Image (tube, rainbow, N blue to C red):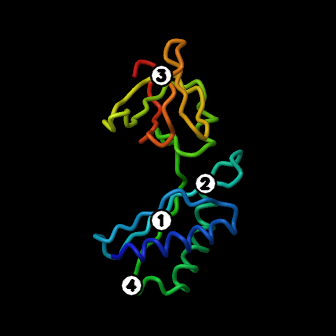
Amino acid sequence: MSNQIVTELTALTERSATNYGFDVIDLKMLTHLNPVSIQINIRHKNPEKKVSIDDCSILSHHLDEAIQNSLILDQPFTLEISSEGISDFLIDEKDFKIFKGFPIEATYLDLKKIEQQTNGLLLKRTDNDLQINQKGKIQRIPVEDVIQVRLTTPSG
């Protein structure tokens, strides 16, 4: 399955989901299955709302119709819509605001472009840097050097 098909499906499902008040967080195509499986994770545009089973069912109908009408795929497929659940990884600005003060592990590139990891409490992420409180000392990592940030337990 070409990357072009995945790109087109992602754009189509994002447009369709937006019309119903949802964001597409992830789209995966499992081409080794017969029929092909399209798995889409969604969340409400309104951060106060949780995705319900009814939301998934309604959006499944609309996205299935949009995919079939688009002619992007010329083979049978199954469609699975689910909520994103709670991820350990912080990605969106909202994630960094919600989990301020929580223990995190940041993976980043140091000045020599060698991958490093550090732990601490999330202070904030700005346009320029990720700020981590390490026992009262603030470590600043340039945003462009951050590979990933994930929640951890207080012990690491």
Q: Is residue 7 above or below residue 146?
A: below
Q: Is residue 98 left or right of residue 135?
A: right
Q: CA distance from mark 4 to mark 1?
A: 16 Å
Q: Residues within 10 Å of mark 4 (few under 14, many from 20)?
A: few
Do labels 3 and 4 touch, CB within 8 Å? no
What's the distance in space between the residues labelled 3 and 4, CA to CA?
49 Å
Q: Which residue is mark 4?
A: 75
Q: Which is more foreground, mark 3 or mark 2?
A: 3
Q: Of tags 4 and 1, which is closer to the observer?
A: 4
- Calculate the distance from the C-alpha at mark 1 to the C-alpha at mark 2: 14 Å
Residue 142: x, y in percent? 50, 36
Numbered mark located on residue 80 in the image = 1
Crowd tier of the residue under label 3, counting other residues whose Cα lies within 10 Å: few below 14, some 14–19, many 20 or above: many
Q: Secondary structure at mark 1?
A: strand
Q: Earlier in the sequence, mark 3 or mark 2?
A: 2
Task: Say which label, 2 or 4, has the lower sequence index.
Answer: 2
Instruction: Report the disc number at residue 43.
Output: 2
Quadrant including the N terminus = bottom left
Q: Quadrant of residue 57?
A: bottom right
Of the numbered discs 3 and 4, the one sitting upstream in the chain is 4
Q: Amino acid at mark 1?
A: Glu
Give the secondary structure at mark 2: strand
Tell me if 104 is positioned left or right of 36 in this view: right
Front residue (pair 110, 67): 110
Residue that lies at the very extreme toward the left in this rendered image: 32
- Relative depth, front residue between 84 and 119: 119
> At numbered mark 3, what does the secondary structure look like: helix, strand or loop?
strand
Lower position in the chain sequence, tag 4 or tag 1: 4
Q: Is residue 42 above or below residue 121?
A: below
Q: Mark 3 or mark 4: which is in front? A: 3
